[in-house]
Image (tube, helix red, strand yellow):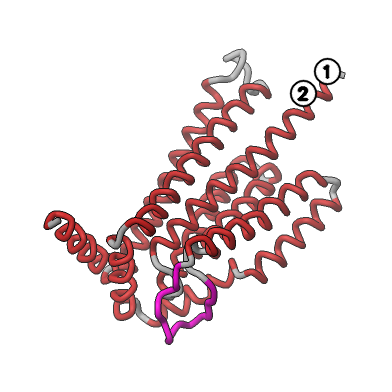
Amino acid sequence: MQDDADLLVQGALWALWAGQHALPLFFVMLALLLAATGVCWWAYGWALRRHAVPPQQSSISPTHFMKLRMAVGVAVILIGTGVFTALAAQLVGGVGLTRADQALTDALRSSVPQPALQVFAALTHLADAATRTGLSIAMVIALMAVGRRWLALGWVVAVAGNGLLTNILKQIFERVRPPNVDSLVLAQGNSFPSGHSSGAVVLYGMLAYVALPLLPARWHLPALVATVALAFTIGASRMFLRVHFASDVMAGFASGAAWLALCITSIELTRWYYQQRTSRH
């Protein structure tokens, strides 16, 4: 029991320290995340070249390409689901996460300067329900106009499905938001997981998925890095503005990444299936 109590105190102290240094830590974590994105992109390209059939060809066979994408998609789904499950278990089964969340939120109140909060308040609106709806309508119309009806359907399933999934999870856990009467933005409803965090991952992830094939190869990595940076910053803004706990944001990232991977993998698998079916006739 004493060891458990010591761990709770230590966790709260670490959270307090993180809250007092939140802004520098945000930039460090953003830099590490972008570096990891670059490494994963390089590894993905290496795997494509490594498994090209036959090796001397510059193009990879559709079947091997699909297998690699399936492997990446399943890995993201499993990791995202695992992270979310771990956070949910800590939230339901213990008090350590709750205490750490509250300590971090309390420290943010006095450690983040007002100009930084105003920037985060502006950026957080990029994943509001109105923004997600407006951008989704525009993208569906554009995809339908160029004859990409199945991709338009995939977009609707991804964005609307994530919103439905997030609302269901919020109702299941019924976590109350952090008490915050001086926030620069209004937030209502339950807290876990963060809908802005999952919504940003899915919305801008789908936008990158649609846009990357249209961009020159040299712009693929910059576009992907920009997408990751935007989604991470929007999610972090919810914590800085104290309308969500840190674990809400992490859970939103995890659920959003898993759902995005499931949707993109399903779209790719459907496309590959029809291409294979067409090539046989």
Q: Which residue is mark 1?
A: 280
**Magenta-tinted stretch:** 175-189
User: Label 2: which residue?
Assistant: 276
What is the magenta segment's predominant secondary structure?
loop
Q: Residue at x 39, y 64 (%)?
A: 246
Query: Looking at the image, which is closer to me, 220 or 70?
Result: 70
Name the element at disc 2: helix
Q: Amino acid at mark 2?
A: Gln
Q: Are marks 1 and 2 in contact (CB under 8 Å)?
A: yes
181 and 88: which is toward the camera:
88
Please give the name of the residue rendered at 48% of the width and 39% of the height, measured from the top-left corner. 78
Disc 1 residue type (three-letter): Arg
Q: Quadrant of the N terminus?
A: bottom left
List x then y, in percent, for residue 39: 43, 39
- Dividing the image into 4 quarters, which one contains the C terminus? top right
Q: Position of residue 54 (x, y in %)?
A: 61, 13
